[in-house]
Amino acid sequence: MLISMTGYGRARLATPRFAQTWEVKGVNSRFLDLKWRLPHFTRSMENAFERLVRQKIHRGRVEISLHFEALGGEFAEAQLNEPLALAMIGKLRDLAAACDAPFAPDMNRFLTVPAVWRDPLSEPDPDLAEQLAAGLGQALNDFKLSRGREGETLARDLLARVQHMEEILARLREATPPIKEKKTAALTARIAELVGGQLGDLPRDRILQEAAILCDKLDVSEELTRLAGHLERLNKVVAAGGETGKRLDFLLQEAFREINTLGNKAQDLTASELSVEFKAELEKCREQVANVE
């Protein structure tokens, strides 16, 4: 099963002491890019949290947030940074005096100044850290399920597009052999026109040599074979699932290279139209693979 980099996970756990709600959101990215939104008092746990995340997520831009709600008295205690508050009041008093203005500080305004308040539990106890890690683990599991469901949708779409490309490839196999015959006949007619229709006066070996060179330039059998191999591998990789995003992207790049070469060599309107149709499907596959882990 393919794994999408896009997903959402959530977990909420509550005890008599506190309630925790974790949210995990992910979008596509070339590498693993973690963005944390955590209460200040959990900063010392962030490294442990990150190790837990990296065990389950390998690519994507992932935002992880924790809403912590204190229910017990140990978390409800507020800690005021009194020296900082007094220094702020002193500076404002000096400013008022310099401006010859009355000064009556509004203490309620300090309720809206985060800098003067300290979070409780600057050194969280191990039991709290363990419970928070358990909550994060549940959110990551929910996130993984979400990405798996999205991955199944991506896999179905990719397999359908690969099947369509296999059908286009079959049409290319039918369309390309006559091209050499038509181009050889056109070359012969052109030479005859240039020499006034007197082909008999020209060395036959020379004409055959030019025709052989032209046929070699128009031969796309190798490109068709390699394209068939790429499509076969795409089917296998999608069916196998797992962390396959980079491998799928590489296979699509190789397929693009082959179909571009084929379209340039064939020099035929039908082959060109089929090549464009093939490349359109490849481009849609590349857009989908950009979301695969």
Image (tube, rainbow, N blue to C red):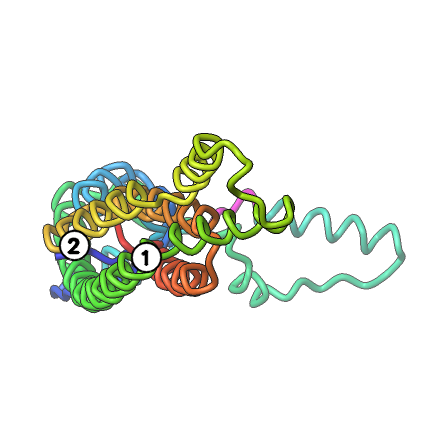
Give 87 or 12, whichever is nearer the viewer. Answer: 12
Q: Quadrant of residue 204?
A: top left
Closer to the eye: label 1 or 2? 2
Give 160 or 35, whichever is nearer the viewer. Answer: 160
Give 226 or 266, whichever is nearer the viewer. Answer: 266
* Residue 220 seen by the camera: yes
Q: Earlier in the sequence, mark 1 or mark 2?
A: 2
Q: Which residue is found at the position 39% from the left and 50% from the top?
A: 180
SS category of the residue bearing label 1: loop
Q: Quadrant of residue 174?
A: bottom left
Q: Quadrant of residue 291?
A: bottom left
Q: Which residue is mark 1?
A: 291
Q: Which residue is mark 2?
A: 235
Q: Which residue is found at the position 44% from the left and 62% from the top?
A: 276
73 horizontally vs 249: left or right: left
Where is residue 12 drawn, in percent x and y?
18, 67
Q: Which residue is found at the position 78% from the left and 48% from the top?
A: 94
Where is residue 202 drawn, in percent x and y?
54, 35
The count of marks equals 2
